[in-house]
Amino acid sequence: MAILFLGIGIGMGYFKKNLYTVMKVPAFRLTDQNKKKITDKDMLGKVYLVEFFFSRCPTICPVMNTNMRAIEEEIDDSGFGIISISIDPEHDTPELLKEHAERIGVKSPNWHFLTGNRDYIGKLADQFNIYVGDKEDESESLNHSGMIALVDKDGNIRCRYNKDNMPILYYSGLNYEDPAGKTPKLAGKYHPDREILIEDIRKLLK
């Protein structure tokens, strides 16, 4: 029995310390707020986050931006970056995205707000397995998930395990009205995934 419990304890420790490899990050090539082409290969050697958003979003995007800014402030490491891909590229030109970055107080040169062809971006979201609405459906085209991908220095999407030792796959960029992160709320004062993202980014930066 002692050996059994020891084995269980070792197994639980493994899941707490190690991050699951979800898949290789999809290849991408888009233009950032400084009119520079940014690709997945440019990000090799950095730990970074990937989100889909748009600058005039009135609901979850400001929340996600605020949480990303908090992470940027907390990490403050040249080996860390953020990729924010606009799903509204006809509106979100590089010039407008530069204004947006300045407005929200972005400091890091490694935070790239990317724009490009909408069909390409839609297919890219599918490859990431992060929901973005169908461009052809007016009621859905600007809908998107609040999920964030965590990418390691080798270009692998990584994640932690939940309490049942199952990989969570993606992290939430939203706020919640409860500490456990069960009920999303725009003005919620809890952001549990922001805290665990900071922990997991630090693991990957070591």
Image: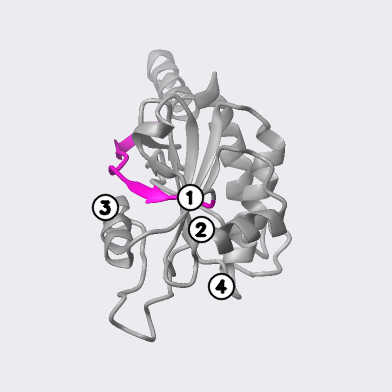
Relative depth, front residue between 202 and 57: 57
Does residue 21 sit above or below 82 in this rendering? above
Relative depth, front residue between 134 and 21: 134
The residue identified by callout 2 is: 94
Q: What amino acid does circle 2 point to?
A: Pro
Region in magenta? 20-33
Q: Residue at x 59, y 73 (%)?
A: 59
The residue identified by callout 4 is: 57
Mark 2 falls on what kind of element?
A: helix
Relative depth, front residue between 49 and 10: 49
Cα separation, mark 1 vs mark 2, equals 6 Å
Marks 1 and 3 close (CB-CB < 8 Å): no
Cα separation, mark 3 vs mark 4, equals 23 Å
Please report whichever mark, 1 or 2, sits nearer to the chain's N-terminal start.
1
Q: Nearer the viewer, mark 1 or mark 3?
A: 1
Q: Nearer the viewer, mark 2 or mark 4?
A: 2
Please report whichever mark, 2 or 4, sits nearer to the chain's N-terminal start.
4
Picture coordinates of residue 202 (x, y %)? 58, 27
Q: Quadrant of residue 10?
A: top left
Cα separation, mark 2 vs mark 3, equals 24 Å
Q: What amino acid does circle 1 point to?
A: Lys
The reply to whether the magenta stretch includes residue 158 is no
Q: Residue at x 49, y 64 (%)?
A: 93
Q: Nearer the viewer, mark 1 or mark 4?
A: 1
Point out which mark residue 189 bears: none
Q: Nearer the viewer, mark 2 or mark 3?
A: 2
The residue identified by callout 3 is: 127
Please report whichever mark, 2 or 3, sits nearer to the chain's N-terminal start.
2
